[in-house]
Amino acid sequence: MANIKSQLKRIKTNRVATERNKAVRSEFKTAIRKFREAVDSGKADDAREALKAASVKLDKAVSKGVIHKNQAANKKSAMAKKANGL
């Protein structure tokens, strides 16, 4: 355990950031899972709605620095491709 005051504060800050990142990551993974379920069920309208929701979650994750913008773009592109295939 650290003895330096600034390092103790840094540990707390990192813990808070890690929890926030976990929450954001969980949200967009859930949105992607819902999209996949809609695609698997063959419901085009539900899939499009889920795609919109997942895209917003991915964009928010990028803005918060949880994932890289290219990773989000790749995920959104793959989902759009699946949605257009319905």
Image (cartoon, rainbow, N blue to C red):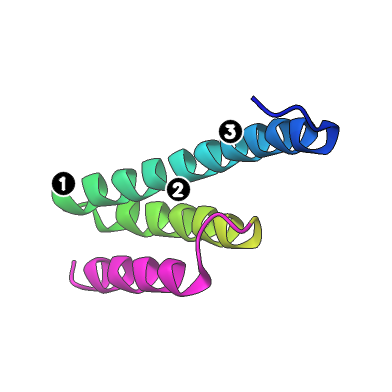
Amino acid type of the residue that numbered disc 3 sits on in the rendered structure:
Glu
Q: Mark on residue 41?
A: 1
Q: Mark on residue 69?
A: none
| Dot placed on the residue nearer the N-terminal end, 1 or 3 | 3
* Other residues around mark 2 within 10 Å, as few (<14) / some (14–19) / many (≥20): many
Residue linked to disc 3:
19
- Which residue shows up at 32% across the image and 43% down it? 34
For the stretch drawn in magenta, what is the main secondary structure?
helix
* Other residues around mark 3 within 10 Å, as few (<14) / some (14–19) / many (≥20): few
| Dot placed on the residue nearer the N-terminal end, 1 or 2 | 2
Q: Indicate the position of residue 51 as horizontal and vertical percent values.
A: 39, 58
Determine which quarter of the picture holds residue 44. bottom left
Residue linked to disc 2:
28
Magenta residues (range): 65-86
Q: Is residue 23 above or below residue 37?
A: above
- Which residue shows up at 73% across the image and 37% down it? 13
Q: Are marks 2 and 3 in contact (CB under 8 Å)?
A: no
- Which residue shows up at 52% across the image and 53% down it? 57
Q: CA distance from mark 1 to mark 3?
A: 33 Å
* Closer mark to the observer between disc 2 and disc 3: 3
| Dot placed on the residue nearer the N-terminal end, 2 or 3 | 3
- In the image, 50 versus 31, the foreground residue is 31
Q: CA distance from mark 1 to mark 2?
A: 20 Å
Amino acid type of the residue that numbered disc 1 sits on in the rendered structure:
Ser
Q: CA distance from mark 2 to mark 3?
A: 15 Å
- Which residue shows up at 63% across the image and 32% down it? 15
